[in-house]
Amino acid sequence: MIGMIDGRTELKPAPAASVGDMRQLQVLDVVVSGEVADLESGGYVTAGTPLVLRQYLILEITVMAAKIAYENAAFVKNVVNNVWKFNFVGFYNGWNKFLKEDTTQAFVFTDRAKDASVVVVAFRGTEPFNMQDWSTDVNLSWLGMGAMGHVHAGFLKALGLQEEDGKDTNRAFPKDAPNGAAPIGKHIAYYKLREVIRDQLKAHPQARLVITGHSLGGALAAVFPALLALHGETEILGRLGTVQTYGQPRVGDATFVSFFRAEVEKATAFYRVVYRYDVVPRVPFDAPPVAEFTHGGSCVYYDGWYDGKVLPGDAPNPNYFDPRYLLSMYGNALGDLLKGAFLWTRAGKDYREGPVSLLYRASGLLVPGLASHSPRDYVNAVRLGRIAPKSLL
């Protein structure tokens, strides 16, 4: 369904340096070696000589990785290897002890097979027709995790929670997977991905780790490095370059945010991208005493025309149901529908939307903010958005 809403798979190279775009966040140089044409001199570069062929914004790579994470393993592998010309490492399913099935999916890739400069982990998000995923997003239950604070129980279970024990963190989420924690042939997401990351960082001594995800995948991308910090995985965290999430729901309380800031963000940047009135970043609610979930990181907020700014706190209408935003939300839904129909005339054919995408946008007229959750708008925001450089400092 998400592929029908937005079928784009190609990465867009970083634009020439210009004032007010998102390239200040980071640029990845994709370097290849070998005898390849030197386009400037007209000759050839000898084997082993590095040549920078492509540059991509890290945001471009993370938003596209978060989008294709919804596809099956064969599709993801083909895109990474043959479309992006990167190096596919693996696609992994994670066992959920409480639901007794694989509920978590993620894939790992590097920018090249040898001497990579980046290792990327992308978690799959909320599947459109999976009610278990949606109920996980809006669930208000959490679990005490000691110094880590209170964390959304559903997200912990998706990563590999062993016991719902709010008093004994080691019993709830031990540092190492207990024997028999998953059936033979199955893997627990946190432990498996941690093992893969260790191996990749060892194989690529200069590489930095990047973690991303959209929706539920964004929540897992935020909780995963916090668990690494809880378990004292300083070597991995020391190589963490950035965490970038899209349409991420809240994952914990104020103590979790403080823990994350002190243990994870001290050496890296956490960017939480929100498009307009997307409903998912506004759940679970931050409405004491009913619920005390709160957001962390830097909120990169885009309005309906992809004008962006970095907010010190939450996005407007943080709990979705504020009646003061009602007219604006419906107006935005209508504006998004019209924009979807005609944006391509200004931005180019890559932004032409088909009937499935426009029909999905029309659903926002019934439930404002639902259509704003589509990965399409997050891709558009990264590619077309502008943001003042001073707000990134």
Image (cartoon, rainbow, N blue to C red):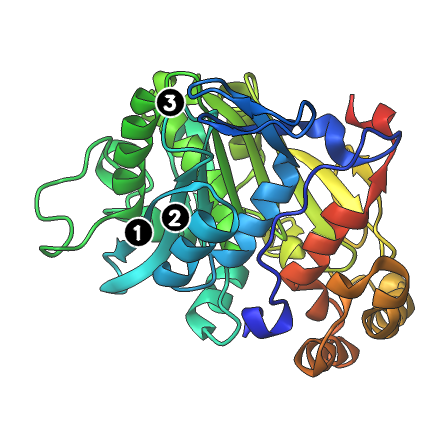
Q: Which mark sits nearer the N-terminus, 3 or 1?
A: 1
Q: Is residue 197 above or below residue 87?
A: above
Residue 240 x %, y %: 48, 24
Q: Which mark sits nearer the N-terminus, 3 or 2?
A: 2
Report the residue marked by disc 1: 92
| Mark closer to the observer (3, 1) | 1
Classify mark 2: helix, strand or loop: strand
Mark 1 residue crowding within 10 angstroms, few (<14) / some (14–19) / many (20+): many
| Mark closer to the observer (3, 2) | 2
Mark 2 residue crowding within 10 angstroms, few (<14) / some (14–19) / many (20+): many
- Residue drawn where x is 85% and y is 41% of the image: 386
Q: Which mark is residue 370?
A: none
Q: Which mark sits nearer the N-terminus, 1 or 2?
A: 1
On the picture, is 291 further left or further right than 17? left
- The residue type indicated by label 3 comes to Ile
Classify mark 3: helix, strand or loop: helix
Mark 3 residue crowding within 10 angstroms, few (<14) / some (14–19) / many (20+): some
Q: Which mark is residue 236?
A: 3
- Residue drawn where x is 46% and y is 74% of the image: 131
Circles 3 and 2 in contact, beta carbons < 8 Å: no
Q: Is residue 355 above or below residue 320?
A: below
- Where's the N terminus, which quadrant? bottom right
The answer for how far apart the CA atoms under marks 1 and 2 are is 6 Å
Q: Name the residue nearer the viewer: 19 or 188.
A: 19
- The residue type indicated by label 1 comes to Tyr
Report the residue marked by disc 2: 107
